Image (cartoon, grey):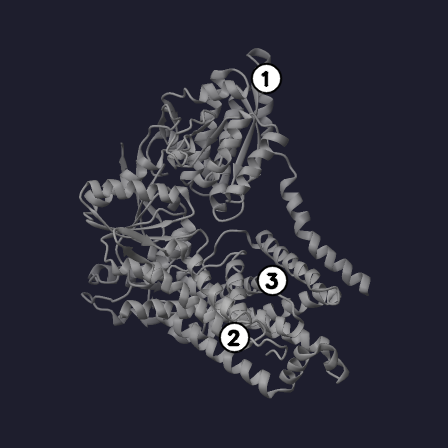
Amino acid sequence: MRFVSRFVLSLAVLAPLALDGCKKSPPAPMPAEATSGAAKQDATHVAAIKVKLGAAQPMTGNIAQYGEETTNGIKLAIKDVNARGKVLFDLKIADDKSEAIGTVNAVRKLIDIDRVNVIIGSVASTCTMAAAGHAQAARIPMMSSASTNSKVTTPVDQKGNRTQLDYVSRVCFIDEYQGKAAAIFAYQDLGSRKAAIMFDAEQDYSKGLRDVFKQVFEQMGGKVVSEESFVTGDKDFGGVLANVKRSAPDCVFLPAYYNQVGIILSQARGKGLECPFIGCDGWDNDKIFELAGKAARGCYFTTHFSPDDPDPMVQDFVKKYKEAYQRAPGALAALGYDAVLAVADACERAGSNDPTAIKNAINTIKDLKVVSGVITLDENRNPVKSVVIMKTLESSTEFLKRWTP
Amino acid sequence: MDFFLEQLGNGLSKGSIFALIAVGYTMVYGVIRLINFAHGEFVMVAAFAGYFCLGALPPSAMPMQGYWALGASMALATACAVLTAGVLAVAVERAAYRPIRKAGRIAALLTAIGVSLFLQNFGIQVVGASDRAFMQERQLPRRVSALSLYKPGDIPPADIYVLHEWPDAATDLEIAFRAGEAIKPEDLADLQSQGVHMVFSLCPMTDGLKRWIIISALAACCLFLHCLVRYTAFGRSMRAVSYDIEGAQFMGVNVNRVISLTFFIGAAIGGLGGVLLALFYNTLDPLMGLIPGLKAFIAAVLGGIGSVPGALLGGLLLGVVEDLVVAYGHFELGSTKFNLTTYRDAVAYTVLITILLLRPQGILGRERAQKL
């Protein structure tokens, strides 16, 4: 009896581990038809370049939804690229757990154990910044799909000296663009003169946006009436919201990620703070509506991509994505897709899978048409592209306008 | 003054939840001197049990109307959560703590941390890591009325939705009339032609309502614990075990049963805290027990670990101190502006460390045994 109960207990303990093993055991799927098509081409054309592509993405933790969406985009793009036959990607995914330390571990694993040629990752700026130095030291190109803090590619030390990490690049716009777009939108389109800012003191992304918004908004003649902070993982915003409400702002700038945004909006409306909130690409996820319901209505945010964009490449991507995953893609999926396209373009031009050659080709990407726009990397390896402004409705978002810097 | 009261109310409701969770720490510590670090995870599991129960039987599916439906549905969800937490705690005690009870306090502490990590990761595997809303809009309690009560030109104060059938299980709310907009005759005619007879409005969960629920739950628990510990045979045996575990055994007290029941009650009250936590912030995830669990532990130590009234006081104090730091953390000294809200936890814990330096045994703790 005792043995039986122990046995059952140990089964209960092992079951989730075993399930986990099952989920992860099959290697990154390579569509059979794509591989055979490529093999056929091999005979007649030049041999395909085989590239091991690592993805350090938040598969668990605070922004796990983003990791899932990004990897969906990455997988879809790999299928397309492999089908063309010029570059053959072999995908390795490592979970960064939505944490800086987790990202360092994930990137080291990809470099030291999986021996990848190039890495796509991560999502949160704080995470990418923590791991960027490791990729640079190992001379493995690392392209972030969605980290928008300007210091990701050019970290600044405490004395204000900029370092160029020439192996680190990205496909998304930087916070300077979207912070500026948000401030101009708040001042001109919404007519706000008094803005409050609520930011996440633990996220470089959030702090960077706060600085840009404040600078641009005050330059135009607006006033920042209160500045409140919270930390990642906070659930209770009653205190800071009471402070914001007391300062009676025309709008609240909230550079944060969707799960906290959902909780904050629902608590804010519960406290009778009715002014519009303005957000950034961290808002771009339907989870906001699940968490906040109607409280999310009437807010605005800047982002990279809208599935309503009539551009044929966007519509083709949306169609393929819906076929594969039964729902419309968000910005993160589009950026994951674009990162793979950018890396594929670089590999093709480099003509090899040598990390340094790929790096040189990435850094000279010019006028590359991808789903989220046309990108050219500048001298800091940041793309020059436009910003989309979205409005939140009852339980969905609506394309409002496109803003070009 | 309003601002102060608002911040105080907020701090008190947050503190009440810490207090409910702290009770479990302190009761278990009082009886077997174990700091049960898995307690925060009992809270999390309870919140999920409540969430699934609420998902199956939301207020909108209750046979009553308005806030009565909310009460009925919440009572069911709470009962489910409290029982789940209690049963889980008893099972964990039986499987993980009892076998090593004599192996020393460090072994027990490490086991507790192990159980805590296990439950967190088990939760992530089973329900996924992302946040969920505890009660979604479509599950809110409803007030149903006949469509014929609405005349063209009326301005409804809240959004009015179409009721298709009873209970309406539709996943999306279909708006009939918007709040603050006069009803157009053609909209009304359109609904009538679709065969709609009944409509409803939602009863929102306001902050004030949540606050009343939390404070009354805390008051009920205080009364329950006081009566349990002071006036029942079980309370007497619990105090005896707390005073001297072997002595109590010699006197015929069934120590194992007392410990199991202590775990059950502590976790059940923590489970109530879990449901309230999920309700108050309208969110839950598998790691939700971690920070409130830690804060409740600190509250228990602050109040004097092993003392039930101490845990309650410690929780309330911690919640209020945290919120007052946020409320009054902005100030100017000369020309420099200080903003302490970022250092909220640092300031709050500095206050707590100061209290502990002055009274190492906690506010209501006693230096000698005789706990509870």
Q: Position of residue A42 (x, y in %)?
A: 58, 15
Spatial CA span between label 2 and label 1? 76 Å
Q: Is residue B107 above or below residue A66?
A: below
Q: Residue furthest bottom?
A: B231
In percent of the image, x 62 and y 65: which residue is there? Answer: B36
Q: Are marks 2 and 1 on the same chain?
A: no
Q: Position of residue A357 (x, y in %)?
A: 50, 18
Residue on which disc 3 sits: B37
Residue on which disc 2 sits: B310
How dense is the environment of label 2, judged by Cα within 10 Å: few (below 14), some, or many (20 and up)? many
Amino acid type, residue under disc 3 in the picture = Phe
Residue on which disc 1 sits: A40
In percent of the image, x 33 and y 49: which residue is there? Answer: A254
Task: State which chain disc 2 sits on.
Answer: B
Contact, CB < 8 Å: mark 2 with mark 1? no
Which quadrant of the structure image shows residue B102?
Answer: bottom right
Amino acid type, residue under disc 2 in the picture = Gly
Task: State which chain disc 3 sits on.
Answer: B
